[in-house]
Image (tube, helix red, strand yellow):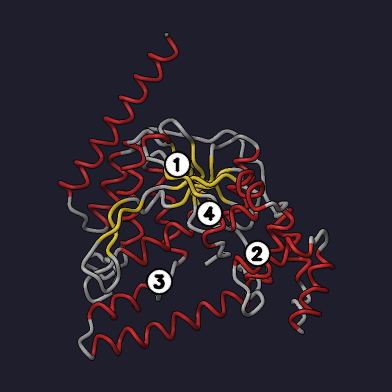
């Protein structure tokens, strides 16, 4: 879900080719949820194997990362650790939304509304511990490093950009900016043609690069004030103030020139006649100084074709021809990029 910055973020369209040779830290949970939501059958059920086990996460991770690797991009997946206690309310709210969506999904199927059924089904996605472990094993088999964050994956990825371990963080959420990521890439894993709901047309989704320093400069705010804007709009950790969207939040911050959280709280109390949550300072501090760890050297390795086949073909009934063809392209791309690197070093 994350904070909604709407059109306030300065987005620059880029190509996958422009990221060749770059190391990018990908928010694992955010990305896998996209796969679980979008890779579904016509009735809304997720992609499954012959035993009825969900495989959408494996399909998404394998084929989308194959495309990144073919374009010379070096992905690193960062997995969430322990969630802060104040995220529990959001998790409970999401569970209620999923339950409501499941009921609407079943009703739409009964009433013969397949497009509505698929739309509601997308909101029921659940990421299990088993899926997480399977995803990690597949990524490692593909030679892609896996990083376990102590808390929020986006916060860890942001720290990795700041310390120069990676070029950028990749997520659909703007929370990465609140966590201080100097460079955020959106749409990295959903690049391509996307169908417009209830319309017989498609749009081209391209990767976007957002630079935190440009956002702050053009909006005329500090990072602390950007976090305050997030608190007004609502984040994964607080509901925000009713009626305040990104533009109103920016106006409030700039007109009042908030320099401290206390000033923001007083504004909300006086102007909107409500109190921000008691733990709002804890949430504010969490964005500015989240729990992170030094990752050290990332372990990029060669793909392991045998393990990939075992997981996808033998265990989950994926098409052996398609898997082998994709593996061949990954191996070829790795050799080609390796040869190019050696040539560059020689020159």
In the drawing, does residue 150 fall left or right of residue 346?
right
Residue identified by numbered label 4: 79
Label whose residue precedes the other's in the sequence (2 or 4): 4
Q: Quadrant of residue 262?
A: bottom right
Q: CA distance from mark 1 to mark 2?
A: 28 Å
Cα distance, mark 3 to mark 1?
Answer: 24 Å
Residue 195 rendering spot, x and y as whole percentages: 27, 63
Distance from disc 3 to disc 4, alpha carbons, whole Å, reads 17 Å
Q: Residue at x 28, y 41 (%)?
A: 306
Q: Secondary structure at mark 1?
A: strand
Residue position for label 3? 125
Task: Say above or below: 126 vs 320.
Answer: below
Chain-order first, disc 3 or disc 4: 4
User: In this rendering, which labeled residue sits more in front, label 1 or label 4?
Assistant: 1
Helix, strand, or loop for circle 4?
strand
Q: Nearer the viewer, residue 288 or 311?
A: 288
Q: Nearer the viewer, residue 126 or 1?
A: 1
Q: Which callout, 3 or 1, points at the residue further toward the start of the chain?
A: 1
């Amino acid at each position: 879900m994350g904070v909604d910055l709407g059109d306030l973020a300065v987005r620059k369209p880029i190509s996958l080719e422009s990221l060749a040779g770059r190391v990018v830290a990908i928010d694992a949970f955010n990305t896998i949820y996209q796969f679980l939501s979008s890779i579904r059958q016509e009735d809304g059920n997720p992609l499954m194997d012959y035993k009825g086990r969900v495989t959408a996460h494996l399909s998404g991770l394998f084929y989308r990362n194959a495309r990144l690797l073919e374009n010379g991009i070096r992905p690193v997946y960062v997995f969430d650790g322990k969630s802060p206690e104040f995220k529990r309310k959001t998790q409970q709210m999401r569970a209620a939304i999923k339950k409501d969506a499941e009921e609407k999904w079943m009703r739409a199927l009964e009433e013969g509304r397949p497009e509505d059924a698929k739309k509601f089904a997308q909101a029921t996605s659940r990421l299990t511990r088993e899926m997480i472990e399977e995803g990690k094993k597949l990524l490692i088999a593909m030679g892609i490093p896996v990083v376990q964050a102590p808390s929020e994956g986006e916060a860890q990825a942001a720290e990795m950009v700041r310390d120069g371990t990676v070029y950028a963080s990749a997520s659909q959420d703007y929370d990465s900016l609140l966590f201080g990521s100097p460079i955020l890439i959106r749409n990295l894993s959903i690049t391509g043609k996307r169908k417009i709901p209830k319309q017989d047309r498609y749009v081209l989704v391209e990767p976007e690069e957002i630079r935190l320093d440009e956002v702050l400069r053009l909006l005329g705010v500090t990072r602390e004030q950007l976090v305050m804007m997030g608190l007004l709009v609502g984040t994964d950790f607080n509901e925000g103030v009713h009626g305040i969207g990104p533009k109103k939040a920016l106006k409030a911050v700039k007109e009042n020139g908030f320099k401290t959280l206390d000033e923001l709280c007083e504004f909300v109390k006086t102007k909107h006649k409500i109190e921000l949550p008691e733990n709002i300072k804890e949430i504010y501090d969490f964005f500015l100084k989240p729990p992170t760890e030094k990752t050290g050297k990332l372990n990029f390795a060669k793909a392991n074709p045998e393990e990939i086949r075992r997981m996808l073909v033998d265990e989950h009934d994926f098409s052996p021809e398609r898997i082998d063809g994709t593996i061949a392209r990954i191996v070829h791309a790795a050799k080609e990029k390796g040869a190019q690197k050696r040539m560059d070093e020689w020159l």
